[in-house]
Image (cartoon, rainbow, N blue to C red):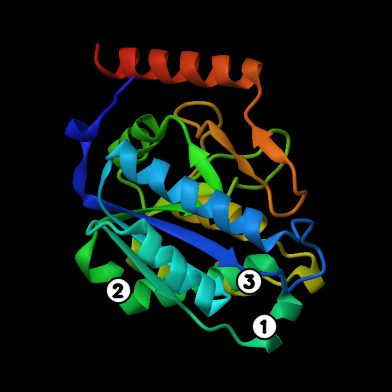
Amino acid sequence: MTTGAAFARPDTAILVTAYLGSPSTPDTALRDAGERYRSTLDAIRRTREAGVAGRIFVALCGNPSEAARLAQEVGDATVSCQWFAQDPSDQARGKGWLEHLLIRSAIAYWRLDESTNYLLKLTGKYVVENLCDVVAIARDRALPVTGWRHLGMNWIDTRCFMFRADAYVAAACLDAIDERASIYVEQAVYTWVRTAAGKPLLFVGRPIITGLSGSTDVRFRTSLWKRALIRAATFFSAHWTNR
């Protein structure tokens, strides 16, 4: 397993998206704004400590005062934080649509389609324990987008996936996200992966995730059996590639 800042790729950046404050959509179980803030700050710090990317960009929405406080507490030159306003009329299309708009806003604000080759998108409050492996697998594929499919579903786990910023902006299928029509972000990204990159990944390099879920208000942790499968598949994939 690859570890440490020695692996850091200057052409790869991490984009963390996070909502702070009281939730604005009814399908959000996490109502404690303080717990949301603390979990987001902890996830950003732990992601920074992994040292796998040249820069970390944190796109925040929700409470602007909380966003300013978080940016001050992060206090690191390699981490850029910015709050983005969101139109209340967009809430009807669901959390996935709001996050999509947040990603688009971040790419435009920081000109990430010009300054980076690849972006690893992480949802705030989650920590990826095998971040080095995730970045290595995705970068070695050198595809417009790399995502990991949910078991038994034609959905991508959008808590963590990697893409070229310019390809994200050009992906028209993402503009169809609308939970009112049962078109969820996980489905739209799956369509993008199948169109731009072929089959999505399953276990090889799959993110091992821990963190607080905003949808269920419970701590999520990748199961032990899935961890074992991910590590075995990643190891044998690297071994076979290097033969």
Measuring 79% from the left and 56% from the top, which residue is drawn there?
A: 29
Q: Quadrant of the C terminus?
A: top left
Whole-angstrom CA distance, mark 1 to mark 2, is 22 Å
* Residue type at numbered disc 3: Trp
Q: Which is more foreground, mark 3 or mark 2? A: 2
Measuring 47% from the left and 26% from the top, which residue is drawn there?
A: 204
* Secondary element at tag 1: helix
Measuring 52% from the left and 21% from the top, which residue is drawn there?
A: 230
* Secondary element at tag 3: helix
Q: Residue 15's x, y, as percent?
A: 40, 58
Q: Is residue 131 left or right of residue 27?
A: left
Whole-angstrom CA distance, mark 3 to mark 2, is 20 Å
Measuring 30% from the left and 59% from the top, which residue is drawn there?
A: 75
Quadrant of residue 57 within the rendered picture? bottom left
Quadrant of residue 176 within the rendered picture? bottom right
Contact? badges 1 and 3 (CB < 8 Å): yes
Specify the label residue 90 is tagged with: 1
Q: Which residue is mark 3?
A: 97
Whole-angstrom CA distance, mark 1 to mark 3, is 8 Å
* Residue type at numbered disc 1: Asp
Q: Residue 11's x, y, as percent?
A: 20, 52
Q: Which residue is mark 2?
A: 110
Marked residue nearer the N-terminal end (3 or 2): 3
Q: Residue 149's x, y, as percent?
A: 60, 40
Q: Residue 202's x, y, as percent?
A: 56, 31
Residue 53 visible? The answer is yes
Mark 2 neighbour class, 10 Å CA radius: few under 14, some 14 to 19, many 20 or more: few
